[in-house]
Amino acid sequence: MDALSPGGPSSHVLRVTGPLVEIEYTGGIAMHDLVLLGGAGLPGEVVSIEAGVVTVQAYEYTGGLAPGHPARGAGHPLCARLGPGLLGGIFDGLLRPLTGIGDRIRPGAAVETTGREGDGRFVPGVCPGQRVGEGEAVGEVRTAGPVTSRVLVPPGVTGEVEWIAPAGDRERDAVVAVVAGTEIAMTGSWPVRRPRPVRARRIPRHPLTTGQRVIDLLFPIARGSTAAVPGGFGTGKTMLLQQIAKWCDADVIVYIGCGERGNEMADVIDELSELEDPRTGGRLAERTVTVANTSDMPMMAREAGVHTGMTVAEYFRDMGLDVVVIADSTSRWAEALREFASRSGELPAEEGYPARLASSIAAFYERAGAVTTLGGGQGSVTVIGAVSPPGAIRPNRSPRTRSASSVACGRSTATSPTRVTIPPSPGRDRSPGTRQR
């Protein structure tokens, strides 16, 4: 939707401070709605409404945006466009394609545009007059990739098939069926912060083979569970996550590069494009969706990127597939939350992070799980995230010293033998001695 087109409430900018933009509240705007800022239509998301002022979290660089500039609500939440063309694609945190655009995405590029160029061949799976329920497939979309996308009945729709498109090539936005008066297209939208519904959640019982012997033997991961790769910055977490993404036996990989260095994401993309998939004989990239928000991109887009990647994973899960989400790194996502919280005046907690950090992380990780889909199939989303704990690296600390917390817990952080001075006992006249620890 263009910034100046009708369809949402008009307003104007009151204040701009980095990614935080305040606009006048004129009604018709709700929490998490998409807002288009300025003449270019920079995308943002409503995070607060109070006393006639709407606080917007901008997902692009706000240089040049000033008080008095127009702002318009899009009339719907921030959504991801889900359909054919996702597999093998490289997207930013708003699921806008990064391939074929040059060096940078044009400011204010439409959030609704997604997917790679090229359409698919639709093959119907039902007949007119047949009754279908929510989550059931009405057909398939066959492309050159190894994974066949299924066109599913949206949640909340149940009834008879009134019309079904014949087999043939279709544009990715084409309507292919009508069920109970509802048109069903090959591509649909879903709010990124709303978990897609399922029929039931199952206990994870089947292992995920990561392809790394030490993990599969000592730290096994179940399909539909969550796992963390902890460690300080620069200790090799990204390399391990890349290996898991390349060699695990999941059907689809969603790789979220959240604040990582651009050269690391480039290495991932290059290797996935070159390596042969042992399951299909094609390229590993053909069953991978890459969400890249590198450290030189707008920081707040990281916050949306993790939810966008999870929404893509749930889309493939609902087709009865096993999906692995690689979140690298959740710590840099938390840094984005801290950056915005410091500008909005939230009460800081430990290390300056907002007090809602724990609930925000939980809301992301709890979307993983092994489920029975609405259509009756079985799928799973496994989340593996990199975490750099606060204080993991303290360059000013001597390697021969111990922290107070390590002493209290009865453990040492020393990396080499430490000489501990033993003071003389009361009432005894002897020189202090030393012992090896």
Image: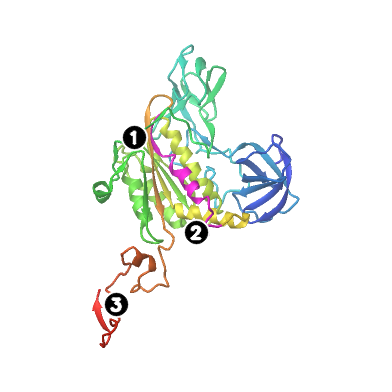
Q: Position of residue 193 (x, y in %)?
A: 53, 40
Q: Is residue 355 magenta?
A: yes
Q: Which residue is mark 3?
A: 420
Q: Position of residue 386 (x, y in %)?
A: 40, 52
SS at mark 2? helix
Dot 3: what SS?
strand
Q: Earlier in the sequence, mark 3 or mark 1?
A: 1
Whichever of labels 2 and 3 marks the residue nearer the N terminus, that label is: 2
Report helix, strand or loop for mark 1.
loop
Instruction: Kindly identify the residue that appears in the image at 70 percent across and 44 percent down.
Output: 71
Q: Amino acid at mark 1?
A: Ile
Q: Disc 2 marks which residue?
A: 350
How many other residues sit within 10 Å of disc 3, few (<14), some (14-19) or many (≥20)?
Answer: few
Mark carried by residue 203 = 1
Residue 16 in view in this figure: yes
Is residue 424 shown above or below 214?
below
- Which residue is more in the foreground, 191 or 269? 191
Magenta-drawn segment:
348-372
Label 2, residues with CA under 10 Å away: few <14, some 14-19, many ≥20: few
Residue 361 placement (x, y as % from top left): 47, 47
Report if the CB atoms under discs 3 and 1 are less than 8 Å apart: no
Circles 2 and 3, Cβ within 8 Å, touching? The answer is no
Amino acid type of disc 3? Val
Residue beneath the point at 45% across and 25% down:
135
- Locate residue 141, reporting x and y percent: 44, 28
Instruction: Name the front one of labels 2 and 1.
Output: 2
Badge 2 amino acid: Glu
Q: Callout 1: 10 Å neighbours few (<14), some, many (20+)? A: few
Looking at the figure, which quarter contains the C terminus?
Answer: bottom left
Q: Residue at x 63, y 46 (%)?
A: 48
- Is residue 300 located in the magenta-colored stretch of the structure? no
